[in-house]
């Protein structure tokens, strides 16, 4: 009986420690941040709460990279500052508690493939879902997964609750034969950090040798430096981008793929209406001919040019 009483007493003494336990073994705390968490009961509780919320949402490893970025970024930057740690932990906990798992099956985007998207929506937009995502690409004929993409952020606008696909506004999931090889490619919207708050994209081209879609850095960069997704001119086998500076300076650039399958600018139209008097526009046309740029410039009356 005395032994049982001693055991119960030890359990009662352990309860406060268990209630404030961190998500990791404090006896092995190696960093100043971990040691600070173990010293502060409130921080220990927050750490366990964040870990529990993370485990809840980390289906298929969806949040793994995002959590690592948070641990190496905001949390690590606090070092041993308890006030800072409490702030970033509360912010992270609120973010995870408001997040919702969104599953979307898109089978009308491409003839041969279906997209099964699992996205953790941070809940920051009422008309769109945004957050880390896993995209499984399914072969419609065999119903087998041919590829899986793990993306740190996807922005998926919705129209009447459904994803916005190949919209003329250039949002959401877009597809076309971007490199004119006879195979449909696709672009998925990353965020809205492009010029003037425009959409940026990860662009994937179909690789016939690997039988998979491969991220193309050149095409993806085009969307980060210009206004949205490029236009596809299948007849001339060109891609066209648009850029601007304020109201009165616009650039339209045409690109072609060279023999090494790299992008090359081949034509540019510059419309400069920054005339202080507001009466004329200077139009410059640049054309690549045999490896050299030829340039011609003309001036037009502003009203006549934009109403022609």
Image (cartoon, grey):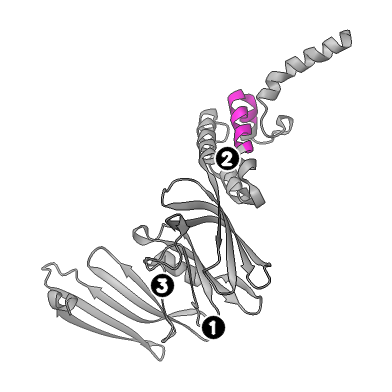
Residue that protrudes farthest toward the top in the picture: 2
Distance between the Cα atoms at labels 1 and 2?
Answer: 48 Å
- Which image quarter: residue 306? bottom left
Q: Which mark is residue 76?
A: 2
Distance between the Cα atoms at labels 1 and 3?
Answer: 18 Å
Asked whether residue 32 is in view, the answer is no
| Mark 2 Cα shell of 10 Å, populated few (<14), some (14-19), many (≥20) | some
The image shows residue 127 at horizontal and vertical percentages of 41, 52
Q: In terms of sequence position, does the residue under pointer 1 or pointer 2 come before the other?
A: 2
- Which image quarter: residue 271? bottom left
Residue annotated with mark 1: 182
The residue nearer to you, when weighing 213 against 279, is 213
Residue at x-position 34% and y-position 59% = 196
| Mark 3 Cα shell of 10 Å, populated few (<14), some (14-19), many (≥20) | many
Q: Give the range drawn in magenta.
A: 35-52
Residue annotated with mark 3: 230
Q: Main secondary structure of the magenta part?
A: helix
Residue 40 within the magenta-colored segment of the rendering: yes
In the rendered image, the vertical position of residue 186 relative to residue 154, given as above or below: below
The label nearer to you, 1 versus 3, is 1
Distance between the Cα atoms at labels 2 and 3?
Answer: 39 Å
- State the SS at label 2: helix
């Amino acid at each position: 009986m005395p032994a049982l009483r001693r055991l119960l007493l030890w359990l009662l003494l352990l309860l406060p420690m268990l209630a404030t336990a961190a998500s990791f073994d404090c006896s092995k705390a190696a960093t100043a941040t971990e040691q600070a968490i173990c010293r502060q009961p409130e921080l220990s509780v927050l750490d366990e709460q964040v870990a529990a919320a993370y485990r809840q949402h980390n289906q298929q490893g969806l949040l793994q990279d995002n959590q690592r970025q948070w641990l190496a970024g905001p949390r690590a930057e606090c070092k041993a500052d308890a006030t800072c740690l409490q702030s970033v932990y509360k912010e992270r906990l609120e973010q995870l508690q408001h997040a919702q798992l969104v599953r979307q099956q898109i089978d009308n985007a491409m003839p041969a493939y279906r997209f099964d998207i699992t996205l953790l929506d941070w809940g920051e937009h009422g008309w769109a879902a945004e957050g880390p995502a896993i995209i499984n690409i399914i072969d419609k004929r065999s119903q087998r997964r041919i590829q899986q993409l793990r993306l740190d952020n996807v922005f998926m606008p919705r129209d009447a609750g459904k994803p916005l696909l190949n919209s003329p506004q250039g949002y959401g999931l877009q597809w076309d034969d971007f490199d004119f090889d006879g195979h449909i490619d696709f672009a998925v919207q990353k965020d809205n950090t492009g010029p003037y708050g425009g959409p940026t994209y990860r662009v994937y081209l179909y690789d016939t040798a690997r039988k998979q879609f491969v991220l193309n850095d050149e095409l993806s960069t085009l969307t980060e430096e210009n206004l949205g997704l490029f236009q596809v001119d299948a007849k001339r086998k060109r891609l066209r981008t648009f850029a601007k500076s304020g109201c009165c300076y616009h650039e339209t650039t045409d690109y072609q793929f060279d023999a090494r399958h790299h992008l090359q600018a081949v034509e540019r139209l510059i419309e400069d209406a920054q005339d202080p008097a507001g009466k004329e526009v200077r139009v410059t046309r640049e054309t690549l001919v045999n490896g050299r740029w030829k340039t011609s410039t003309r001036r037009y009356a502003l009203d006549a040019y934009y109403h022609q």
